[in-house]
Image (cartoon, grey):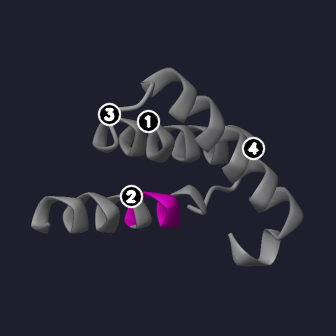
Amino acid sequence: MQIKLTVRALALLSLGLVAACGDTAVEQALMGGGAGAATAVVLNGSVGTGAVVGAAANVAYCQKYPSRC
């Protein structure tokens, strides 16, 4: 039970990192990609897919809500 709770906590923390700051779209993509890849490693998923999804999500979020990034 403790392991599942730890994995879930790490996954939520990583999702929070997807909304990381970045001044340019490239910085936002790199930070989001890193967070997505890290989340994929923790969850035993595809690192490449996690990086792509994380990068796209972070850029989309920061472009839509620039005041929050």
Of mark 3 and mark 1, the one earlier in the sequence is: 1
| Marking on residue 48 | none
Determine which residue is flagged by label 2.
Answer: 11
1 relative to 42 in the view: left or right: left
Q: Which residue is mark 3?
A: 44
Q: Which residue is mark 1?
A: 37
Mark 3 or mark 4, earlier in chain: 4
Q: Mark 3 against mark 1, which lies toward the viewer?
A: 3
Q: Nearer the viewer, mark 2 or mark 1?
A: 2
**Residue 17 position within the rendered picture, expressed as x and y whole percent measured from the top left:** 48, 61
Q: Secondary structure at mark 3?
A: loop
What residue span does the magenta drawing correspond to? 13-17
**Alpha-carbon span between mark 2 and mark 1:** 11 Å
x and y percent of residue 52 in the render? 62, 30
Query: From what the image shows, is residue 30 above or below residue 19?
Result: above
Q: Which residue is mark 4?
A: 25
> Sequence order check: which comes first, mark 2 or mark 3?
2
Quote the CA–CA distance across marks 4 and 1. Answer: 18 Å
- Please, what secondary structure does the residue beneath circle 4 have? helix
